[in-house]
Image (cartoon, helix red, strand yellow):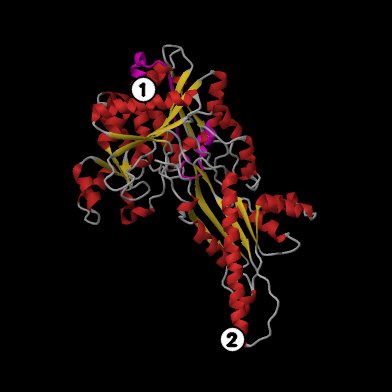
Amino acid sequence: MNQQLRQLPIEMQIEKLTIDLVNINSINGTAGEGEIIDFVYDQMQTFPYYQKNPSLLWTTRVKNDPIGRKNLFAFVQSPKKTKKTIIYHSHLDTVDIEDYGNLKEYAFSAKQLEAFFKTYEGNADVQNDALSGDWMFGRGAVDMKSGAAVHIANTLYFSNHLEELEGNLLLILNGGEESEHDGIIDALDELNRLKIEEKLDFLMAINTDFTTPLYGNDPHRYIYTGVAGKLLPSFHIYGREVHVGDTLSGIDPNYIAAKITERIHNNFELTEQIEGETILPPTCLYQRDTKETYTVQTASTSHIYFNYFLYKETPNQVIDKLKAIAQQASLEAEKYLQKQYERYVEFSKVPKHHLAWNIEVVTYHEFISYLNERGVNTDFIIKEALEKNVGKESRQQSFAIVNALQKADPEHRPRVILFFAPPFLPHNYLKDNKEQDRILKQTITEVVAEVANETGEQFKVKRFFPYLADGSFLSIHATEKELYELLDNFPEWEALYPVPFEKIKALNIPSVTMGVYGKDGHKWTERVYKPYSFGILPGLIRKTTRELFKVHRH
């Protein structure tokens, strides 16, 4: 493998590596996640540097992982004998291929898909890209096996040109990114081990996750010096079930859920207003009641959760906003139900009864406190709920806990319970009041300007990578107080989603995204733009690496 690569210019090395990686089925949640790491390990073993230094290339198994995920680490030691180290990292898992339909058998074949799209008239932009020869298609082509190929090729380059390396490099390749980031979370143990045992000083991590146009005919290539975080605010809504023949006396939790979703889903008023950044609104990912079969009884409970991007805000600020929204939605529902009942009584000439549609809105922490004050053994209920729901996905286990607690309410009142469910991704960014961050940002800005002059590319340096990425787990900006505000409303996080906050805080590695460029990530038309991704980006990363080591020379 090494002989084949060394005979090629670096852009062709990256293209070949990308084709080989795309050709391997490494769909998230399958054994392919481990197999593709084995493939890369076998290829990198042939590099002269690792033949001379085999101990500097190794893999670790992701702990307690049922499908055998692995992380790959490749270290390149500077001849300067320094502890300064830059991390290159990428994920190698992909989303599923169901969106390819009848073309599923070609989903991992860049050549077959290019041939197909050259004759595809369903989308002129896709066809033109295929005909140009400048784009590579295939699942994972842009998200993000090409990014991994860039890092592998640059690792090979520096391992053959040690004289250019004034600091160390550490390549990390992992899986699990497309679900709950199991790979990078597990890699934190190894990073902390290297920091303690080898006394490595991690200056930054460069992630090559994909970047894309932000609007039609967008000419820019984007560099991101931080990454957005993510919360999954969830609502357990308990109403008052009734027979459909008596529907006006009930409280349908689906109706409350609809009112809440209407106020949160894609509501740009809820986004943080950060000038010059691509800020995305919350999105409803799940909404359904808990009825398992058809009956003529209305539902008793309904569940919703939202993808909620976090940039600078704290979890507590999010809780306050969403609680207020749920209260507004519930109050409006109460007034609506009261009005409909009064119209029914007036029209039907039936005796009017005193009915109440009051719906209480509480946070998980507030509800636990309420139950404990009434002598309810919440610890036992939670433990029992977890035991009964072993094997279910973590979000469903979270809802099971809240549901069991709701059933223990001695007053059985209609209620909306707001909490956080897995996953949680910390947000991080370079801060102007921190010297190391200022140096890093200035270095990146200067290098980008130089590469722009040399290549004619139009770059923009932004603060937040607008999508979810493994870089979230390398640094955390939340204070201890802010973390507790999150964890107080995160049912059994240590069991369901044990984010290792202390390990992240011990590292606090700035995360920068210098990504491959492409279109349609997670779509069957996914493709990576070769001239930039294979030609310009690798040089940009190498130049940034060299310049940052120079700045930290002393």
Badge 1 is on which residue? Answer: 47
Residue at left 45%, top 52%?
A: 268
User: Could you tell me how far apart the alpha carbons at marks 1 and 2 are, in whole angstroms?
Assistant: 84 Å
**Residue that appears at 31% across and 34% down:** 459
Q: Is mark 1 on a helix, strand or loop?
A: loop
Q: Does the magenta stretch include residue 178?
A: yes
Q: Going by the image, does 24 lie left or right of 530?
A: right
Q: In which quarter of the image is the N terminus?
A: top left
Q: Nearer the viewer, residue 109 or 307?
A: 307
Residue 316: x and y, percent? Answer: 60, 45
Crowding at mark 1 (Cα within 10 Å: few <14, some 14-19, many 20+): many
Q: Nearer the viewer, mark 1 or mark 2?
A: 2
In the drawing, does residue 354 fall left or right of residue 156? right
Residue nearest the observer in this picture, 21 or 154: 154
Is 156 situated above or below 61?
above
Query: Residue extending furthest bottom?
Result: 349
Stretch of the chain drawn in magenta: 158-187
Q: Which residue type does callout 2 highlight?
A: Phe
Which three-letter amino acid code belongs to the residue tagged 1? Phe
Q: Mark 2 points at which residue?
A: 347
